Amino acid sequence: MASVTQRIHHLLDHWLTEAPDQPFIHLPDGRCVTFAELGALAYIAETELRALDVRPGDRVMVVAENCPEHAALIVACSRVGAWSCGVNARMAPGEIEAFAERADARVVYFTAAASPTAAAHAARFDATLSALPGMLRSAVRPEAQIEPGPLRDAVAALIFTSGTTGEPKGVMLTHDALIHFARVTRDARALTPADRSYAFVPMTHIFGLGTVLISSLLSGAQLVMRPQFDPDDLLDALAHHGVSQLQGPPTLFSRLMAHLQQHGITKPVAPALRYLYTGAGPLDLALKQRVEAMFGLALHHGYGLSEYAGSVHVTRLGEQRPDTSAGYAVAEAEVQVTDPATGRPLPLGERGELWLRGRGLMPGYFRDPEATAAVMRDGGWYASGDLGEMHADGALFVVGRLKEMIIRSGFNVYPAEVETALNTHPSIQRSAVVGRPEGDGNEEIVAFVELRPGAPLEPAALREHLRSRLAPYKRPARIVALAELPTNNNGKILKRVLREQAGSMMSQGD
């Protein structure tokens, strides 16, 4: 793209001039939305926002599941200078209300036609019809306060963290950070208008917003857009709708592999597929190997987070690593491995907390200076709370969360190591390991496992399996089989829930 883009809506403006009739969004009913049609929807939304006196620096919350109208609202917010604030419609009513209050939203929209749950939330807000087809909206809140200062014009979106380990916080993402990450994504995947991405990851999450939507707007790549993940629909899209890019959290690939096994599918039909990517969660080596064997392609991996508007490390196109590395630093991003106690940089190969800085870093948490100060360090570094190590070739390995590290018999136990060993067992689909306090600073290791379809759990055989793979102090004291591991709406395993469950267990053995 020759012109310099400064705001999200400029990305669509380019295609409205260059290729207005080019398909952009493919829907489940077979309809296709061109750039011109998305532009028309964005114009309707922009006109309504201005009529409602939505101002630069106001927050426009969208309770949504993926649909073209949500994308149009994101563009329209950019045009009027408001901040879009997407919230997943599958959240509980109390969560939706809390987010609206924390965002100090000027108005709340609901993607009612695309999502019955969004429509149910709309009823609780006494929402009325929007001029935007298929949308409902709340009344305007005249008491909403405009964000003052330079942030008013710099910020494009507000995304609330998933809250897997605590209270969600509003991450402010700038236009510059999101567009920069879109360029990084385009280059890392060689995205062109000939590509089609399977777009089920919620646009209310940085993965769906930045990795999928905005990078596709930048590159002109097409979206096979879906409100939710459905493995049968995905297989149909791979076989018949030209999907060339498939990206999602590890949960997606775990569920897909379970579905293929359950239906006896040994080789999915995917004639256009050329790129697989997973992020937004730890990658297990056993899952990676199964996916690569199934599709005959490298499963690319990256490390990023909402606070950085996307990935800071990603594996290289054309490279198929034999490990679970998150790859190499992207343009204008830095990662430093530090001693968690002192903040001192650590040598290559040593494990420590990952500090980040660069162009994509957030300016802070919305109206939460204490939370911002708790994670920001001198020199513009952000202390992520993630644990990792850097190898001599520049490849990053993420090994877990600092808060999730388990202290057992005086040793540090990283849950990811135990989970990797568990997941090599043929009966286990995926696992999650947490610590249960025992007193005196010691913790019991508790493993929750989700079994593959039809597979039994034989504790004695599983413990024998682990004996050759884990030191004694790393082996779980308890192994609990669940029908399905709890996850949030973005596919991340809710270890907070599992820790609570482990804490409620009695002290005797299995």
Image (cartoon, rainbow, N blue to C red):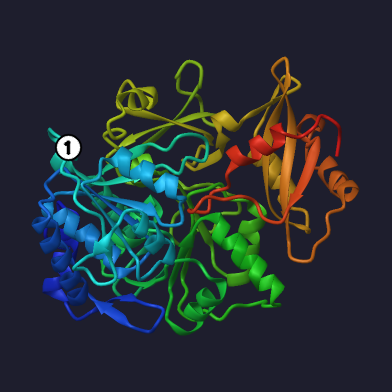
**Residue 239's x, y, as percent?**
51, 82
Label 1 crowd bin: few (<14), some (14–19), many (20+), radius 10 Å? some
> Relative to residue 354, is residue 111 drawn left or right?
left
- Residue 417 vs residue 54, the one in the foreground: 54
Mark 1 residue type: Gln
Could you say which quadrant of the image residue 336 lies in? Answer: top left
> Relative to residue 171, is residue 437 drawn left or right?
right
Residue 43 visible? The answer is yes
Residue 313 visible? The answer is no
> Relative to residue 132, is residue 66 drawn left or right?
right
| Residue shown at the point (29%, 33%) measured from the top left | 364
Where does the N terminus fall, quadrant-wise?
A: bottom left
- Residue 290 vs residue 190, the one in the foreground: 290
| Residue shown at the point (19%, 70%) measured from the top left | 41
**Residue 37's x, y, as percent?**
20, 76
What residue sits right under mark 1 in the picture? 145
- Residue 86 vs residue 316, the one in the foreground: 86
The image shows residue 63, relative to residue 437, as above or below, that is: below
| Residue shown at the point (38%, 84%) measured from the top left | 30
